Amino acid sequence: MLFYSPGEDIKKEVTMLNKNLIKPVRLRKGDTIGLVCPSEPVYRPERLEGGIKELESLGFKCVVGETAKKQHGYMAGTDQERADDLNNMFADPLINGIISITGGSSANRILSYLNYELIRKNPKVFLGISDISVLLNAIHAKTNLVTFHGPYVIHGICEMSDYDRDYFKRALMNTKPVGTISEFVPRKVLKEGIASGPLIGGNLSSLRSVLGTPYEPDWRGKILFWEEYKTEPHNIDRMLCHLKLAGVLEKITGLISGNLTMCQEKKYAGKSLEIEEIILDHCRDYGFPIMTNMDFGHNCQNVTIPLGVKGTINTYQNKFSIDENGVV
């Protein structure tokens, strides 16, 4: 068996960072959840209503932020309005957790408007996916707060499966580690090995947008998880190449990819490489294990994953586990 591990210096630094993790208080029945649109507006209000009903069925009260009522082009308000909505939710002592209503493509525009010191002093569960990966990673990088990659309101929560609901509760409402993730769809192993380290990741396009900025996460010793939506393989190739050239792949200790929804090749139909080939092309020089087709991402079973806590990949046992609690 191959056990992949970063150097001793990196392990010491990762251990120190983990000791300084800020974990939010778990969600409980009766808590109030703030719902925000940090990127695109609400185009389908009936799905917002469906998501609120699901959250209420779990015992929560919901407060809908101002951005749910706003539109500025393809955004839910101006940059300042969207940042203010999120800042205010963190500042409000009556709000226990925050969930993004939508995804989009403009979350990076509000990064410089967020009050990271306020967020650090008022740690709360913050959950989202897709473009919200920008915010999950930026907030984690700037504050060391554990944030959560998982279903947002209009896709996932409004039509929550039993599988998704189980992992939502295990990650956000329970102080025990999530533990071993059960396999809903068959996984693929691209490179054998065993690796442990803090989990970091999200939507690949969104992760790429913070490279080289003050909001880029610390990749050293991490297990990188990523998913993608409506992106053709030749563009996934370009993004993975960017990560490699930026030095990300030489720093991580493992890699897992989730569901690649609607990522069929159109421009080079019939001539494209398979995505598994592309991943191996860019990772062949590194010894870390790689697993694909995991149960997270868009329009699929979607495990809630805490950013910053320890996880383990064991390809010999076809196993992915979240070994540390994300809430207290």
Image: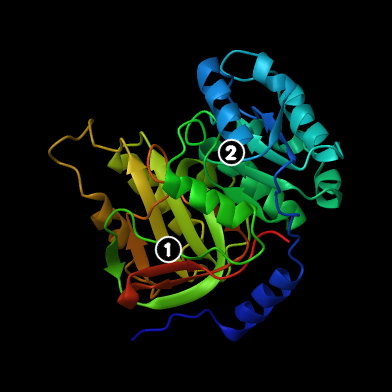
Check residue 255 in the rendering and tell me which mark sits there, or answer none.
1
- Neighbourhood count class around disc 1 (C-alpha, 10 Å): few under 14, some 14–19, many 20 upward: many
First in residue order: circle 1 vs circle 2:
2
- Judged left or right of residue 325, residue 24 is right
Q: How is the image coloured?
A: rainbow
Q: Is residue 17 above or below residue 63?
A: below
| Label 1 secondary element | strand
When asked about the image quadrant of residue 35, the answer is top right
Q: Quadrant of the N terminus?
A: bottom left
In the depicted view, which residue is nearer to us: 33 or 197?
33
User: What residue type is disc 1 on?
Assistant: Leu
When asked about the image quadrant of residue 254, the answer is bottom left
| Label 2 secondary element | helix
Q: In which quarter of the image is the C terminus?
A: bottom right
Could you tell me residue 62's position as x and y percent? 70, 30
Residue at left offset 51%, top offset 53%: 167
Residue at left offset 26%, top offset 56%: 276
Q: Name the residue under label 2.
A: 132
User: What residue type is disc 2 on?
Assistant: Ile
Residue 213 seen in render? no
Q: In this view, does 42 lie above or below 252?
A: above
Residue at left offset 52%, top offset 17%: 46
Residue at left offset 80%, top offset 40%: 90
- Judged left or right of residue 21, residue 75 is left
In the depicted view, which residue is nearer to us: 243 or 222?
222
C-alpha span from label 1 to label 2:
20 Å
- Neighbourhood count class around disc 2 (C-alpha, 10 Å): few under 14, some 14–19, many 20 upward: many
Could you tell me residue 42's position as x and y percent? 57, 19
